[in-house]
Amino acid sequence: MPLSLEQNDELCEIRLEGAVNIACAQELKRLLLDALASGLDTRVALDGVTEFDACALQLLIAASRKWRQDGRRLAIAGCGAGAVAESIARAGIERLELEAVAETLNEE
């Protein structure tokens, strides 16, 4: 479950890999809060995720709403296939609904 946060002058990027589940929820929440505190737009890369549970999904949905409230963009990349798409389907959330919450950045 490697989770990392990288930041430059324009963007924060949170990269998630492996199993992203309740076991790493605190760490994911901390990274999201750090990115939020930066005041920058943020991209969450899910391309390397092999397991993604409802807890992780809830954190991302809550984060995307907060970014939107603050007038910033949160892009969620890699949610269209694999473990992430399966988690979205199990939760009964339409992919388009999640995309409507998460703004798209040019880097996607």
Image: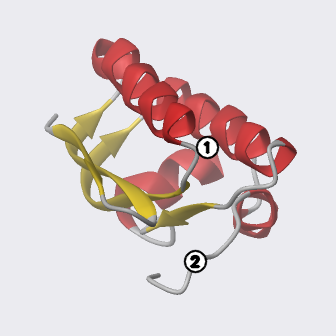
Q: How is the image coloured?
A: secondary structure
Q: Is 16 located above or below residue 99 in the figure? A: above
Q: Amino acid at mark 2?
A: Leu
Q: Nearer the viewer, residue 47 or 63?
A: 63
Q: Amino acid at mark 1?
A: Arg
Looking at marks 2 and 1 on the same chain, the residue that comes earlier in the sequence is marked by: 1
Q: Is residue 96 visible?
A: yes
Q: Is residue 91 visible?
A: no
Q: In what element is the residue under mark 1?
A: helix
Query: Residue 78: x, y in percent?
Result: 42, 69
Q: Is 95 located above or below residue 90 in the figure? A: below
Horizontally, residue 20 falls left or right of residue 105, namely: left
> In this view, which residue lies farthest toward the front?
9
Which quarter of the rendering shows the N terminus? top left
Depth check, mark 2 against mark 1: the one in front is: 2
Query: Disc number at residue 57?
Result: none
Query: Residue 108: x, y in percent?
Result: 47, 81
As measured in the structure, the alpha-carbon distance from the residue carrying label 2 to the one carrying label 1 is 26 Å
Q: Mark 2–mark 1 contact, CB under 8 Å?
A: no
Q: In what element is the residue under mark 2?
A: loop
Find disc 1 in the rendering and name its residue.
Answer: 90
Q: Residue at x 29, y 14 (%)?
A: 23
Find disc 2 in the rendering and name its residue.
Answer: 105
